[in-house]
Amino acid sequence: MTALPASRLRNLPSVDQVLREPPAATAIQRFGRHAVTDAVRNALANARAAGLAGAAVPEASDVAAEALAQLKAGERSSLRPVFNLTGTVLHTNLGRALLAEEAIEAIRAAMREAVALEFDVEKGERGERDDHLRSLVCELTGAEDATVVNNNAAAVLLVLNTFALGREAIVSRGELIEIGGSFRMPDIMTRAGARLVEVGTTNRTHPKDYAAALGAETGLVLKVHTSNYRVEGFTAEVSARELSSISKARGVPLVHDLGSGTLVDLARYGLGHEPTVREAVADGADLVTFSGDKLLGGPQAGFIVGRKDLIAALGRNPMKRALRLDKLRLAALEATLKLYRDPDRLAGRLPTLRLLARPAADIAALAAHLRPVVADALGEAFTVDVVECRSQIGSGALPLETLPSAGLALSPRSGSGKALEALAAALRALPVPVIGRIANQTLALDLRCLEDEAGFTANLAGLDAGGANALA
Ligand SMILES: *Cc1c(COP(=O)(O)O)cnc(C)c1O
């Protein structure tokens, strides 16, 4: 006869009893008494709830082991490294660009030591944060002046707030973009305090549309690179060059939001041509904004380059302080930008470019090499095939262009979508989660971004595909 739950719970060990158990002693050494006591209380509360629902009352040693397991699980960083086999190189949800070793070294140095962040070492007086990048950015883009903020969204916000607060910002209806859900041009405009004036239509905007909208209330004209989509068919847009002469004639600044903004012609590396920052500057934009962690291949940042008087005005906006970069990212950006001085060696040193320019034949050879290893780890219930596939650049750069790549297609021999879901979950449960893409009854692993083959193989040894096999 089982006792009533409430009376059985009287046998639940006390916090002190649990703390005397060996696993608790181990835990205290590693995590400290305070954290362990909290974890034990938590484990006891769980046991009490389970006991009320009819479960057996655990021993003190079980509770101690449970508390230790909880603490260990909580210790693992939630910002974990993963294998990005999604086929998207600059994957926003997976952290975009991987940094060059030179940038990583620069961050390490800036973390350990005091640095001359806002200090002019030569003159021995206060310096400016922007000075570290200004001349380098101007050299690489042909711009007169430059500043840098938290990300490109911040760059656009700061520009709008500085030049169009309480005034009008003119944008073509074909360029009112949304990026990654939370960056919508009309919303940013409102929050920046600017009144959006839409001109033209979704597919066609003409010079006369801008000319008619320009007036005494105009704070700026904004041209947005429609980075993540393309309007095709019966279309017309006003080029930056033409727009520059229209806005100059009226004394209104033209701002060109390039989004990804590359510093080199990607055609050089066998990719399509994405407008470079130098071209946007040469085409006459008064300010150009672009990201640091998209094609540029650095840490998250937003650049604003262009006319000296306008950059100075941005510096006087109190918002600039709230959007500024810390020393770590400045250090990483400086090191990354310096790599651009030697374009011949760039693809070897900058991971983003190295991955984008990786030859499909190399990736296919890797796929052939890994196929038996993966098949072995997965077990009988799944087939593993080498397949050709197409990678994407990601982050809105060259949205319609895909890169020939290769990978592995994992499919259940019989079975359902459930087996595939279970397999994807098992791969995500690995010490270094493996992230692929499910489409058409297969889990595709695009190997373009896999460079550590040995690490991948060792990680795969921990795969528990039993559940997935049972479903397949
Ligand atoms: C990506 C993008 C942004 C936002 O840049 P973040 O660096 O992600 O803040 C803004 N405008 C365009 C055109 C973009 O492509």
Image (cartoon, rainbow, N blue to C red):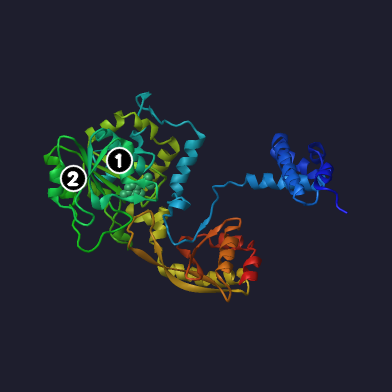
Quarter of the view holding residue 195: top left
Q: Nearer the viewer, residue 160 or 200?
A: 200
Q: Earlier in the sequence, mark 1 or mark 2?
A: 1
The local secondary structure at tag 1 comes to helix
Against 457, is 151 above or below? Answer: above
**Mark 2 vs ligand 1: CB under 8 Å?**
no
The local secondary structure at tag 2 comes to loop
Q: Residue furthest top?
A: 125
Q: Which residue is mark 1?
A: 189
Against 378, is 287 above or below? Answer: above
Between marks 1 and 2, how big is the CA–CA gap?
23 Å
Of tags 1 and 2, the one toward the viewer is 1
Q: Is residue 447 left or right of residue 245?
A: right
- Residue 320 visible in rendering: yes
Q: Position of residue 138 (x, y in %)?
A: 27, 41
Q: Position of residue 408 (x, y in %)?
A: 50, 70
Against 35, is 437 above or below? Answer: below
Q: Nearer the viewer, residue 158 or 29?
A: 158
Q: Measuring 48% from the left and 38% from the top, which residue is drawn there? A: 109
Q: Measuring 49% from the left and 40% from the top, which residue is drawn there? A: 108
Q: Which residue is mark 2?
A: 284
Quarter of the view holding residue 418: bottom right
Q: Position of residue 4 (x, y in %)?
A: 83, 48
- The amino acid sitting under disc 2 is Gly
Circles 1 and 2, Cβ within 8 Å, touching? The answer is no
- Residue 245 visible in rendering: no
Q: Position of residue 291 (x, y in %)?
A: 35, 46
Q: Residue furthest bottom?
A: 414
Q: In which quadrant will I find the N terminus?
A: bottom right
Q: In which quadrant will I find the C terminus?
A: bottom right
User: Alpha-carbon neighbours of circle 2 within 10 Å: few (<14), some, or many (≥20)?
Assistant: many
